[in-house]
Image (spheres, rainbow, N blue to C red):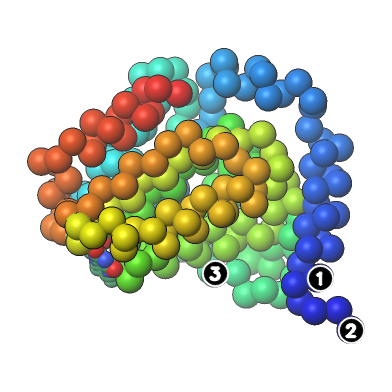
Amino acid sequence: MLGAGTLFMDRVAKAETMISAMSAPDNNNTKSQKQMKIVVLTGSPRKNGNSAHLADQFIKGAQENGHSVFRFDCAFQKFEGCIGCNRCGMNGDCIFNDDFNLVKDHIVDADMVVFATPMYYFGVSAQLKKAIDRFYSINGKIKGANKKTAYLMTYANTNPQQAEAMKSHYTIMSEYLGWKDMGQVIAPGVWSAGDIKSTSYGKKAYDLGKSL
Ligand SMILES: Cc1cc2nc3c(=O)[nH]c(=O)nc-3n(C[C@H](O)[C@H](O)[C@H](O)COP(=O)(O)O)c2cc1C
């Protein structure tokens, strides 16, 4: 009997075959020079919080550079977490018809997907993770697609080691999806909403957006 891991990899292999058939071989050279469609997924329930500020600044820089941005604030949309029913087969219709539909096609079409989140118990916020888990139904369309990505993250403590699990999750997920990391802004020492405004991290996020 096959293990769950084997089944997962079988499905991934099928999805990869579809992706390679869909991708034009010369896309890699042209995409970095054109104006990009960027999706920003935010994970904080604090509207004027620290990670929202990083997202704002990143978006400002990217828009000034001519890129278009679609922002999806996960905490303010109503959608379910993946229940692993496998109806989608990792590349098909999800059993849920909810607000994730508002962003799904944007993610598939995007040249870049950016994650902005607070640290919640050493991981991404549940609100953002719920959206990431819903990638499952579009996995076959986004894995191996020619996309860029970036990471914006805030946390209250100042020990850099405590950010390692989140950085590792982002890096491994990016590698799995085949998305190119364009930069990370990891902001420690910000607790209350707005603390970030007295740091240089907002400028770093702006510069990252502007550099694209
Ligand atoms: C539920 C919860 C869990 C948190 N977990 C951590 C943590 O593990 N480590 C940490 O340094 N800060 C933690 N914090 C603090 C936030 O990461 C920090 O305040 C962050 O800047 C909030 O970003 P936001 O304003 O975008 O929501 C936590 C805050 C909350 C509400």
Give the quadrant of the C terminus: top left
Q: Secondary structure at mark 1?
A: helix
Q: Disc 1 marks which residue?
A: 7
First reached walking from the N terminus: tag 1 or tag 3: 1
Answer with left or right where residue 22 lies relative to residue 153: right
Ligand 1: quadrant of the figure = bottom left
> Where residue 82 sits in the image (x, y, percent)?
60, 69
CA–CA distance in space, label 1 to label 2: 10 Å
Identify the amino acid type marked 2: Met
Identify the amino acid type marked 3: Gly
Q: Disc 3 marks which residue?
A: 81
Q: Secondary structure at mark 3?
A: loop
Answer with left or right where residue 96 lies relative to residue 158: right
Asked whether the viewer can see residue 212, the reply is yes
Answer with left or right where residue 18 lies relative to residue 84: right
User: Dot 1, how many residues are within 10 Å of its Cα: few (below 14), some (14-19), or many (20+)?
Assistant: few
Residue that appears at 71% across and 42% down? 144
CA–CA distance in space, label 2 to label 3: 28 Å
User: Dot 2, how many residues are within 10 Å of its Cα: few (below 14), some (14-19), or many (20+)?
Assistant: few
Q: Disc 2 marks which residue?
A: 1
Residue that appears at 81% across and 71% down? 7
> Where residue 30 sits in the image (x, y, percent)?
65, 17
> Where residue 66 sits in the image (x, y, percent)?
44, 18
| Labelled pair 1, 3 in contact (Cβ < 8 Å) | no
Location of residue 102 with respect to 81 vertically, above or below: above
Q: Quadrant location of residue 87?
A: bottom right
Give the quadrant of the N terminus: bottom right
